[in-house]
Amino acid sequence: LGQVDWPSLQLNSCGAQRTYNFDRMTQKNLATGKTRTIRFQLDVPLDWTTSHRHLLQEGVGTRYKYVWVESPVILEAVRKLLSQSAHAAPDCQVMANVHVKSVHRIEHFLLWQKYSSHLRNMQAEHARLGVNCCEVCPLMGCNEPAMRHSRTCLDTGTSLNSNLNECLLFH
């Protein structure tokens, strides 16, 4: 691999000795002396605000992983999902009048990669076994037509996978 001296790393890549500096997000070709920005694209939801640098630093504290969501649209969508998921029973009616004070999102790259990998593995296994999932009937919870608009506000480019019967569960 090469010499590791966090936040930099020196290794041989494609026949060239390079030094990577993760604080500055640059790579330097040691033979030519040329330095350029490290270019990469992480496969994470579009609305994530944590910088790629912090997403890749596994040892960083939770400060960068715990993100306050300020969107009034998201707050209202969560309120509707919670209040509309209340059972008709008298002891569950407390959720019908729920007030959402804040919403926080966890932006954890390794957990996201694990989740994404699990979805891909399930899809491959379904294809291998010839499994075809159909929508659960009757539509309940967040899949009810009245709740779909609120749910889609939370999708942010990574909608739930209906081919795997993926859904939100509230209790």
Image (spheres, helix red, strand yellow):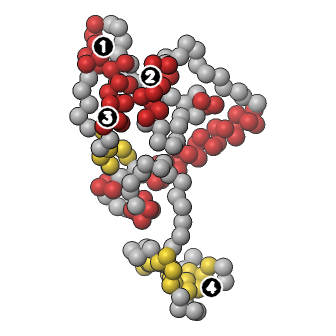
Residue 152, horizontal then vertical, whole percent: 47, 32
Mark 1 vs mark 3: which is more N-terminal? 3
Real-space CA distance between mark 2 and mark 1, rounded to the nearest whole angstrom: 18 Å
Real-space CA distance between mark 1 and mark 3, rounded to the nearest whole angstrom: 21 Å
Check the image and report above or below for 130 versus 108: above
Task: Kindly state the secondary structure of the residue where label 4 is placed.
Answer: strand
Mark 2 vs mark 4: which is more N-terminal? 4
Instruction: Give the residue pinned by disc 1.
Output: 92
Q: Which residue appears at 71% of the width and 27% of the height?
A: 132
**Can the viewer see residue 6 in this picture?**
no
Q: Which residue appears at 66% of the width and 79% of the height?
A: 14
Instruction: Give the residue pinned by disc 4.
Output: 16
Which image quarter holds the N terminus? bottom right
Q: Are marks 3 and 2 in contact (CB under 8 Å)?
A: no
Check the image and report above or below for 142 versus 124: above
Instruction: Give the residue pinned by disc 2.
Output: 147
* Residue 75 circle label: 3
Q: How many marks?
A: 4
Residue closer to the observer: 103 or 66: 103
Amino acid beneath label 4: Ala
